[in-house]
Image: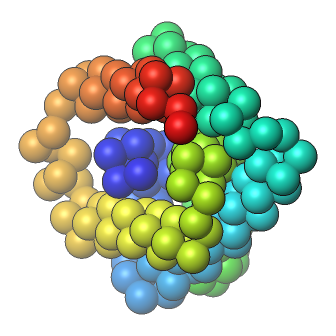
Amino acid sequence: MFLAEFGDKTQLCTLALYIRYKRFLPIILGTSLGFLLVDSIAVVFGLILTSLIPLQLFRIFSGVVFIIFGIYFYIKKDDEICPTDDGRSPFLASFTLISTTEMGDKTQLMVIALVAAFNNPIQIIPGAMLALVSISSITLLLGGKLLEKFPFKKIKLIIPTIFIIVGVLQILFNE
């Protein structure tokens, strides 16, 4: 989850919010609450799907979804704009940004797939939150310096590769 979110549009928008408001605590709290909402929805959705579809079939399906998203992220163009100047407080702006941009995003889909793979939401939610809040905190604390050090082109190749590998492993080791 940490690697999947690294360099994502959400992190760039979070950085844009920090540049605009220059207030770490309300932004990280709003970001955290947004991630908690979106990931909780993903866990519930994953649990519903695994109760309706045989677990082995759902795991194969989630593996295929990971592979498709990996391929999609190789060819995807990032031309999305993040709204940071909406007159809201830093907390509300961050919460709204995360809640809307992460809905249906690759990390939310990854949470659904993790529910299928491990069927343990009690561990998945804290793990996902730790990864997502950690990367958001690093983004806010290191900001532009981090972006200067890591070449985005390499990051954008690593992330889809991880998705494809996870998808293949999900299909091969479907027990």
- Place of residue 69 in the rendered image (x, y in percent of width and height, measured from the top left): 56, 24
Can residue 171 be seen here? The reply is yes
135, 62: nearer the viewer: 62
**Residue 137 appears in which quarter of the rendering?**
bottom left
Taking the spot 43% from the left edge, 68% from the top edge, the residue there is 127
160, 57: nearer the viewer: 57
Name the outermost residue toward the right.
52
Name the outermost residue toward the front.
175
Taking the spot 53% from the left edge, 38% from the top edge, the residue there is 175
Relative to 171, say whether 71 is above or below. above
Taking the spot 58% from the left edge, 66% from the top edge, the residue there is 120
**Residue 30 appears in which quarter of the rendering?**
bottom right
User: In screen coordinates, is 140 left or right of 92?
Assistant: left
- Place of residue 20 in the rendered image (x, y in percent of width and height, measured from the top left): 45, 68
Name the outermost residue toward the bottom.
25
Taking the spot 49% from the left edge, 43% from the top edge, the residue there is 9
Colour convention: rainbow
31, 107: nearer the viewer: 107
- Place of residue 82 in the rendered image (x, y in percent of width and height, measured from the top left): 59, 48
Relative to 14, say whether 89 is above or below. below
- Label count reads 0
- Place of residue 98 in the rendered image (x, y in percent of width and height, measured from the top left): 61, 62
User: In screen coordinates, is 16 left or right of 65?
Assistant: left
Can residue 167 be seen here? The reply is no
33, 121: nearer the viewer: 121
